[in-house]
Amino acid sequence: MKNLISILAHPTSIAALLGLIILIFALIRVRKVKFTTKIITQIGIALAMSTVLSLLKIYQLPQGGSVTFGAMVPILLIALFYGPEMGFLTGFLYGLISLMINPYIFQPIQVLFDYPLPFMALGLVGFFRNKWLLGTIIAVFARFICHFISGVVFFASYAPKGTSPVLYSIIYNASFLSIDAVICIIIMSVLPIKKLYKIANNGYEM
């Protein structure tokens, strides 16, 4: 009991515990998936597209985070077409790719909350196949929560003097993620999502 209280008394420990719980949940979900050549190929294509789009930055923030030309869209589509499990996996892999391409490493738990976990969160849209707009907003907000936790726990020292780390993290992460989300929603609004879903799922309706 004393050990548990000691762990919960430290923000870093709480973040690590939360991150571990989320990873275990996602792993359990992904293990149930049956992989086919088609799905593996489409995940590969989605990862390639997200990576290319992430390199086309509108602007880049100094402590990480950027506005892109819809880098989240391919991950969101995979989750919509094949379910949240595929979204979790694709987001996790994209997070690792993003870490390799543009690393901003402060400490191991921070890496978890700034790379794999936030992009895994995009898989949540897969629970909202018939309400993709609502699902996209929820998924992107879940990504925001991951970055927000990282900002409060690990980047508090970057907050301007007299500014709450909580407020700083909200403003910092919302400044790029809100715009990035709007861009993704606009792109998805013009895509024939139902037709693409039908093609991806051998003629089945969304």
Image: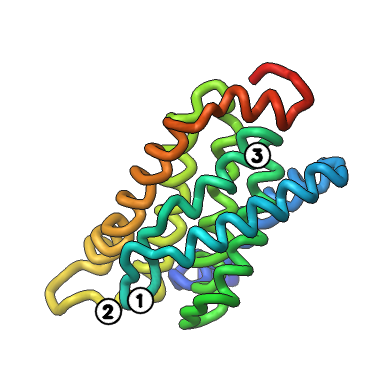
Q: What is the residue that sits farthest to the left in this orientation?
A: 162
The N terminus appears in which quarter of the rendering?
bottom right
Residue drawn at 26 percent across, 58 percent down: 175
Q: Is residue 41 above or below residue 195?
A: below
The residue lying at 54 percent from left, 66 percent from top is 115
Mark 1 near mark 2, Cβ–Cβ under 8 Å?
yes
The residue identified by callout 1 is 63
Q: Which residue is mark 3?
A: 84
* Nearer-N-terminus badge (3/1): 1
Kind of element beneath mark 1? loop
Q: Position of residue 83 (x, y in %)?
A: 68, 35
Residue 81 lies left or right of residue 163; in this view the side is right
State the colouring used for the structure image: rainbow
Amino acid type at circle 3 is: Pro
> For the residue labelled by badge 2, is the local secondary structure a helix, a strand or a loop?
helix
Instruction: Specify the label residue 158 is tagged with.
Output: 2
Q: Earlier in the sequence, mark 1 or mark 2?
A: 1
